[in-house]
């Protein structure tokens, strides 16, 4: 066996555990796979600073703020020139207590912050829906402590397209993508149902971990629309 083959053979022990279900290759939703994906993301020069809470999404904008730990810090994020003026107005106009309420208690407020961000983009609302969920997700990761750090799941093309396969695999029911298309309450409800099912087998996975697993495993796939 030559050196390249030996290296590839050695790498096999780090490959994600997968399974074939109805002809589709699904990544197994377990803690070990989550750890492997997080390690790969942290090592990836394109993404490692995006998930660094001391730099985060500000890294790519040429900003560098040492601490993003108070509720006011999200206004620093919102004031970035990267986003349109209307969106900056919405983020920066929120009072500290109101913003804290939306981040710490999103379910009780029907995930209103997502709607505020999406609507602020005007006619481009469809484009910005995914962005709104990402902003809320990372805002929580940067400025919230405790279990509330995981209050939001990311809604993007890869995750929403692959989710029906995992709903069928873990919940044993068929759900079409249109059921939760831009319906965040239904979307996150289904994600949490999968997580609750996993808990029955002592697999506790965060929303963030599940997001990253599906995204990393399927981002190069051409997934049929369910």
Image (cartoon, rainbow, N blue to C red):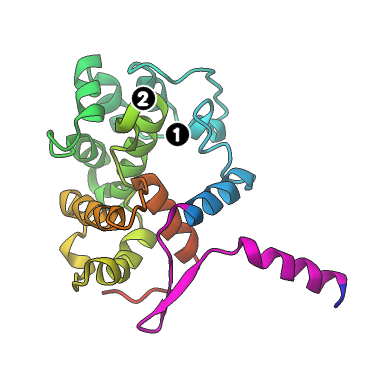
- Residue that numbered label 2 is attached to: 145
Q: In this view, does 86 lie to the left or right of 222?
A: left
User: Residue 5 in the image: x percent, y percent?
Assistant: 79, 74
**Furthest residue to the bottom?**
23
Residue 221 in view, yes or no:
no
Could you give the CA–CA distance between mark 2 and mark 1, rounded to whole angstroms? Answer: 26 Å
User: Residue 206 in the image: x percent, y percent?
Assistant: 36, 45
Asked if 6 appears above or below 196 in the picture, the reply is below
Q: Residue at the spot x=50%, y=54% of the render?
A: 32
**Furthest residue to the right?**
2
Within 10 Å of disc 1 (Cα), the crowding (few <14, some 14-19, many 20+) is few
User: Residue 123 in the image: x percent, y percent?
Assistant: 24, 48
Image quadrant for the N terminus? bottom right
Within 10 Å of disc 2 (Cα), the crowding (few <14, some 14-19, many 20+) is few
Q: Residue at the spot x=19%, y=24% of the render?
A: 101
Magenta-drawn stretch contains 94: no
Q: Which element carries disc 2, helix, strand or loop? A: loop
- Residue that numbered label 1 is attached to: 82
Which of pointers 2 and 1 indicates the residue nearer the eye?
Answer: 2
Between 28 and 4, the one lying in front of the other is: 28
Magenta-drawn stretch contains 15: yes
* Magenta extent: 3-31
């Amino acid at each position: 066996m030559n050196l390249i083959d030996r290296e590839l053979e050695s790498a096999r022990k780090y490959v994600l555990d997968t399974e074939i279900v109805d002809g589709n290759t699904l990544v197994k939703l377990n803690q070990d796979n989550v750890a492997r994906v997080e390690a790969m993301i942290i090592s990836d020069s394109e993404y490692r600073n995006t998930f660094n809470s001391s730099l985060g999404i500000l890294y790519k904008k040429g900003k560098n703020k040492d601490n993003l730990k108070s509720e006011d810090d999200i206004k620093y994020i919102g004031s970035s020139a990267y986003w349109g003026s209307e969106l900056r107005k919405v983020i920066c106009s929120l009072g500290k207590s109101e913003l804290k309420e939306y981040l710490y208690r999103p379910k009780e407020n029907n995930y209103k912050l997502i709607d505020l961000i999406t609507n602020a983009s005007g006619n481009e609302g469809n484009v910005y829906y995914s962005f709104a969920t990402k902003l809320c997700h990372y805002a929580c990761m940067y400025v919230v402590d405790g279990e509330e750090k995981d209050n939001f799941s990311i809604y993007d093309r890869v995750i929403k397209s692959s989710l029906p396969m995992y709903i069928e695999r873990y919940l044993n029911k068929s759900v079409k993508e249109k059921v939760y298309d831009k319906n965040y309450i239904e979307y996150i409800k289904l994600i949490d149902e999968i997580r609750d099912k996993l808990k029955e087998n002592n697999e506790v996975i965060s929303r963030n971990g599940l997001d990253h697993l599906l995204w990393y495993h399927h981002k190069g796939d051409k997934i049929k629309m369910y």
